[in-house]
Image: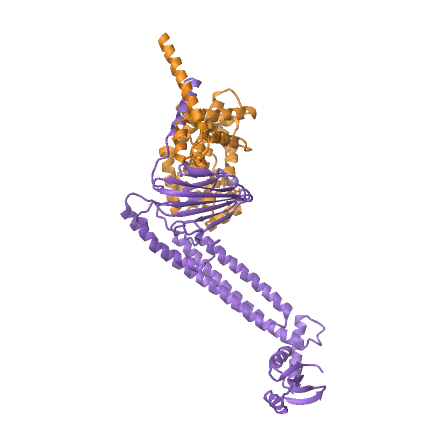
Amino acid sequence: MALTRMHNTLSKSHVMADRMVTVNRLEEVVSTSDEFDQVVSQALPMLLDRATGYTKRFLRETGQWNDDIEHEKFALRWGSEYLERFLVCGRSEVPCRPLFLFDSLVAKQHSKPEPFCYHPDLLRPLGRFLDGLVARAVVSRDALIALYHHSYGWGAGDVIAVTGLNGLESQRIYKNFRRWRESGWQRTMDEVGLTKAELAELGHQQQRQRQRFNSEAERLIRVAQAHYRKSEPDHYPCLSRSQWGDMFAQGYGCDYRIWHLALCLDCMQTAWGLGSSGSLTGEKPRLELQVRP
Amino acid sequence: MGHEEELEAYRSQLLESLNSRPEIRSWSDPIQVYVNERRVGELESAGIGAMLQVQCVDHIETVQLRAEDGTLLGGLTAPECGYRTDRVRLSADTVELSVHNLAQGGTLSALFTPAPSFWSRAWKSIADVTDRVVARRPEPALAYGMRTVAFTQALLAIAVVGLVADRITTGRTSDRTPSPVVQTATLSPAPAVDMAKFEQQLGELARMQAKVDDALGSQQKGVVQLQQALVKLSSTQESFESNVLTVREEIEKRLETVGRETDRQTRQMASRGRVEQEQLEAAIQNLTADNHRLAKEVVSLEEYNQVLKTKLQTAVASASKAVDPSPERLLKMADSLQATQQQMPFLFWVTFSDGTSQESIDKWVYEMQGHKGAVSEGWQEVRIVPPAVPPDRFLEQIRGEKIVKAARIGQ
Ligand SMILES: [Zn+2]
């Protein structure tokens, strides 16, 4: 018993000592990208905690913090996001002192007007699901295309018809769907920390309280879409029906259509029927949130 | 599961995914390019070289390359001022990133270079296709086939080069830029199949290109016709400045519209993602229709030209007497004037160059079928049948004669 405790104390102090060594190493100059990779990859847990700590502090200081697991998860998620960017972009900054570079990168993120999409309702499972989905759509084309499925329950063929795509572009849509089903969806769920139980509960709500579930989802997805649409190319604003009509009729702006219509419920209503070539002549689409890919 | 454990599980999961580096493979899908965490375009990368250039009004802080599934493949952070370059390795392929930040903003160029492969076999035929296009439109900055988009706030413009089946580029931004190319659907480990598919698509591309060439050719013919009409018009109307000006303005306006139209259609045709044969044919039909319209415009312009010519003659002939400039009135006056002119000889006065003999003067008058009249202060009056050209045009001709020093109509 005493031995175990002593052992624990020993290993704990060992960990502490390790941590100090890591920190010291990160404060020293690294001069090549390989050296950067090596030093940083040994310090991931410490760097994750550091970025998470900064994010918590930022939330506290901007009056957006609450002592609950949702906020903890949110801070972790963004800490990990910053760390990922640091791992990839930091190596171009050599020679540098990784720790200070890391701190400045996080500080730079937090100095932006809206570093992330914060809304208390987006921290609960449904909100987290939607926030994760839309956030992922900004960086992943697979997720972007999947957003059509999750929002309206469409398959690849529907997406192609609605956005008025042609042959080659369509092949890509099928690939996007496949990859999303195979790994993209799970990865996104992991990223926002949705547990199996939470996902099962969402599925339940979707089945049993369909209307309430969808109207709540619509409210929340609008919040997320409005935030993440800012990551769209700047030249992709909302358009009028006739402007969308021109684009569909003349066959340009393929990228524009795919991006904007996935990320804007209103424009989907506006542009409805323009690309469908007769196959989708029903009512305008309403949000029918799908939990599973 | 308690909150502590749940949180710890989440943390471990995040760490695990941070630890696993992106899967190394050949990227057959386009690479998404982000500047300052905004998407700015993509690099087509199915085994071919591609280039993306981005100009921002803001400084470029970060550049990120992502796969279609969102995996962060590489990137860099750039200094506020100056250059930063980096080479991102994706398996055997590389993307060279180069950022240049100035006080007024930044530029990014991303160059995708594939691992050398069987694709090099295809270079030659591809070069043949692209060379034809290059020959047509030499201006590199805005040649069609490049997508150029004006950004409203942060990003000024982005140009994508190096494209897909139906996207042919003409611009070469640097010598290192590989020839713009054609992309098959996927680069799978069965090169023979792909190669066949590729070659077939290449053939299609060449045929399509020929069609586009034809269409552009006929469109350009229309423009040439208009230009000829313009030249004709302006040469016959020197002395009726105001009317000519109106016509010229109108023609220029039309030419501009036509030019813009040609340009727009051309650019659209080339940059429009994956154009299918049908769409292309429809576009060609449009071009043909445009051409008919152009031809009609030329005809009507020529008709208008005739009317102007008539007005011009009458107006000048009656210039000294005309009090009412309305065209109807002028036309009526022209009729009566022409009638009187037929009966009356045309009078003008000339002086001759120093040392001109009387003999050559007589010969000159004789050749004009004219008659000498009075001589006053060195000026010789000459009477001839009314000339076919307007009087001042006629005087110009006279003044051009070797022996004539000066010529005028009144005394
Ligand atoms: Zn919109």
Report if residue A35 is visible in the image.
yes
Report if residue A115 is visible in the image.
no
Q: Outermost residue toward the bottom?
A: B359
Q: Is residue A148 left or right of residue B57?
A: left
Location of residue B332 with respect to B187 vertically, above or below = below
**Is A165 in front, or is A133?**
A133
**Is A190 in front, or is B49?**
B49
Q: Outermost residue toward the top?
A: A2
Q: Colour of chain A?
A: orange
Q: Residue A208: x and y, percent?
A: 44, 26
Location of residue B25 with respect to B284 vertically, above or below = above
Kindly identify the residue that appears in the image at 50 percent across and 67 percent down.
B225
Q: Residue B26: x and y, percent?
A: 34, 41
Q: Quadrant for the N terminus of chain B, please.
A: top left
Where, by quadrant of the figure, is residue A48 drawn? Answer: top left
Q: Colour of chain B?
A: purple
The scheme the figure's colours follow is by chain
Q: Quadrant for the C terminus of chain B, please.
A: bottom right
Total marks shown come to 0
Location of residue B42 with respect to A83 vertically, above or below = below
Q: Is residue B181 left or right of residue A287?
A: left
Q: Residue B298: x and y, percent?
A: 53, 67
Q: Residue B383: x and y, percent?
A: 66, 87
